[in-house]
Image (cartoon, rainbow, N blue to C red):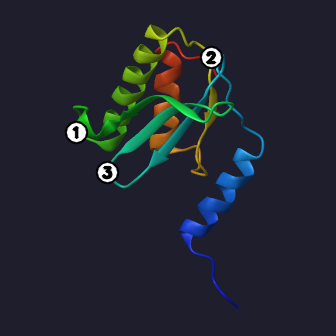
Amino acid sequence: MATISRHNKRESRHKRVRAKVVGTKARPRLSIYKSNTRVIAQLIDDAEGKTLLAVSSQGEKGKTPLERAEKAAATLALLASAKGLKAVVFDRGGFQYVGTVKAFAESARAAGLEF
């Protein structure tokens, strides 16, 4: 019996999420990717296939990846509000909603994004 890798499990979860989540110009998709060192987030308009905003936690200040992710989320919310975007659809990218992903989402909500 073949074993399924962690990467393949995440990809199948992501496909399941993407089947239900679609971003529009008025309500773009907030897609995140989490690596061991950083979180990368994008606001995507799926109707046109364009990325409206992108932010990474790589340039943020903080001791832990969780703190950097929270600051990146606040930065994303600030840039989104400058473009007139308030509401988004959250795409967790197949990652479980715990730890860094949860901290990112809660920080984005606290900074003014609605999802």
Amino acid type, residue under disc 2 in the picture: Ala
Q: Residue at x 49, y 34 (%)?
A: 42
* Residue 55 placement (x, y as % from top left): 38, 32
**10 or 66, nearer to the observer:** 10
Q: Which mark is residue 63?
A: 1
User: Could you tell me which residue is drawn at 53 percent across and 20 percent down?
Assistant: 109
Comparing 32 with 82, the one in front is: 82
Q: Amino acid at mark 3?
A: Thr
Specify which label sits upstream in the sequence, 2 or 3: 3
Percent from the top left, x then y, of residue 62?
A: 23, 34
Residue lying farthest front?
48
User: Could you tell me how many numbered marks the image carries?
Assistant: 3
Q: CA distance from mark 3 to mark 1?
A: 12 Å
Task: Check the picture and name the quadrant holding the C terminus.
Answer: top right
Please say if the residues under marks 2 and 3 sit with CB atoms less than 8 Å apart.
Answer: no
Q: In the figure, is residue 62 to the left or right of 101?
A: left
- Regarding mark 1 in the picture, which secondary structure is present there? loop
**Mark 2 falls on what kind of element?**
loop
From mark 2 to mark 3, how far is it between C-alphas?
A: 28 Å
Q: Tag on residue 87?
A: 2
Q: Residue at x 52, y 26 (%)?
A: 106
Instruction: Report which residue position mark 3 lands on.
Output: 37
Are there few (<14), some (14-19), or many (20+) residues within 10 Å of tag 2? some
* Coordinates of residue 16 in the picture (x, y in percent): 74, 52
Which residue appears at 57% of the width and 74% of the height? 5
Determine whether the residue tagged by mark 3 lies in a helix, strand or loop. loop
- Contact (CB < 8 A) between labels 1 and 2? no
Name the amino acid, label 1: Lys
